Image (tube, rainbow, N blue to C red):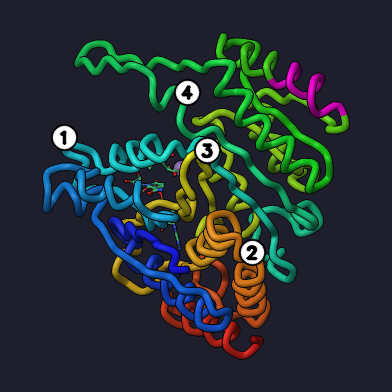
Amino acid sequence: MTHRIVLLPGDGIGPEVTDAARAVLEAVAHAYGLSLAFESHDIGGCAIDTDGDPFPAATAQACADADAVFLGAVGGPKWDGGGPRPEAGLLALRKTLGAFANLRPITLFPGLEHLSPLKEDRVAGTDMLIVRELTGGIYFGDKVEGDETASDLCSYSRREVERISRIAFEAARRRSGRVTSVDKANVLATSRLWRNTVVALRDAEYPDVELDHVLVDAMAMKLIERPSAFDVILTENMFGDILSDEASVIAGSIGLAPSASLSESHGGLYEPIHGSAPDIAGQGKANPVGAILSAAMLLRHALKANDAATAIEQAVADCLSEGISTADAGGTASTDEVKSAVCDNIAKTH
Ligand code: NAD
Ligand code: IPM
Ligand code: MN
């Protein structure tokens, strides 16, 4: 059986890290006898340049028909001057696929403690999973875009909160059995609905899971104070966006962090959490690890190819422990050198 994977390289460093993820998928497919068929399409700024639309109909159709979608990154200063925004393409993609459950694991690789901006004793043992709601909240509410006033409506339904909470509670049962729900219930109505819904679901269906609540401003502080205290972090769309960038750098670099965005009706969307990094695009400096680990998440979640996913994760960990990494992660290797080293490790160990 051939698995159809749509690649959306996008803008900036997107194509560079997507090339690495594809090479690693091909290496692991060869080693594990998987049949993968790749198709590439435009999204974001490059799609605006060719189609005038950040999410062209042909891209939307190909993604809907695929078994899984992999995205590099979108955006950049070229499209900041008015007109359609590249980021709108990514948001439309997430909505179209129903990719509501964004899993952002933040793991400190053994031996890389010194890369953290935090003291080594504080960062040791950091291993958390941020479960970010991805298709609701302030990102998708009605907007008023005026010169004098502007507004973005933040709304959540009980159903939206329940389904993302279920993902977090299930993950907690496979991990340490603890969920920290992050909200702003002292100010926001959506956060009070969020908290009530999370508590009701836990009481009704997950009484074995330990649940606590932290306000988002305090969470920003606690994350740097004691990152290893957290396991599963459940939060809404915008808070999850912000806290995951913060958490990523605690574990060394945003370039290392992967994500999976799961849907009830599709194999899902897989993308590193970083953006198009215009400051380093085209220089061979981009860390491909976040993208490569996103490819591993694709294999695990969309294709149920757990052994192949684990092989990628092990090959990446081996490279990092051998000191083969890009500058953001303390090394001197180029994007392509990391890519080749991961592929070689897969071939060697299989
Ligand atoms: P960014 O994540 O692109 O970059 C932030 C910093 O991290 C930069 O210094 C960059 O060089 C560095 N960095 C990011 N990824 C790296 C990697 N793989 N290797 C080494 N260093 C890396 O965030 P930004 O600068 O705020 O945003 C740039 C553009 O990307 C904006 O247009 C934004 O909207 C877009 N963006 C897209 C996505 C996405 O497509 N999923 C995510 C975030 C931001
Ligand atoms: C991310 C990005 C996106 C988000 C942008 C580019 C729309 O920052 O994937 O974290 O805010 O979700
Ligand atoms: Mn982000």
Rendering coords of residue 212 (x, y %):
79, 26
Instruction: Find the magenta span and give its range.
Output: 198-207
Where is residue 131, by image quadrant?
top right
Of the residues shown, which amino acid type is indicated by label 4? Answer: Gly
Q: CA distance from mark 2 to mark 3?
A: 37 Å
Q: Residues within 10 Å of mark 3 (few under 14, many from 20)?
A: few
Q: Main secondary structure of the magenta part?
A: helix
Q: Which residue is mark 3?
A: 264
Q: 225 left or right of 151?
A: right
Q: CA distance from mark 4 to mark 3?
A: 18 Å
Q: Is residue 205 visible?
A: yes
Rendering coords of residue 189 (x, y %):
57, 9
Looking at the image, residue 229 lies above or below residue 281: above
Of marks 1 and 3, the one in the foreground: 3
Q: Residues within 10 Å of mark 1 (few under 14, many from 20)?
A: few
Of marks 2 and 3, the one in the foreground: 3
Q: Is residue 200 magenta?
A: yes
Q: Which residue is mark 4?
A: 137
| Residue for point 54% across, 45% down | 245
Q: Secondary structure at mark 2?
A: helix
Of marks 1 and 2, the one in the foreground: 1
Q: Residues within 10 Å of mark 4 (few under 14, many from 20)?
A: many
Name which of mark 4 and mark 2 comes first in the sequence: 2
| Residue for point 32% across, 57% down | 8
Q: Which residue is mark 1?
A: 82
Q: Is residue 25 magenta?
A: no
Q: CA distance from mark 1 to mark 2?
A: 38 Å
Of the residues shown, which amino acid type is indicated by label 2? Answer: Leu
Q: CA distance from mark 1 to mark 3?
A: 35 Å
Q: Which residue is mark 2?
A: 115
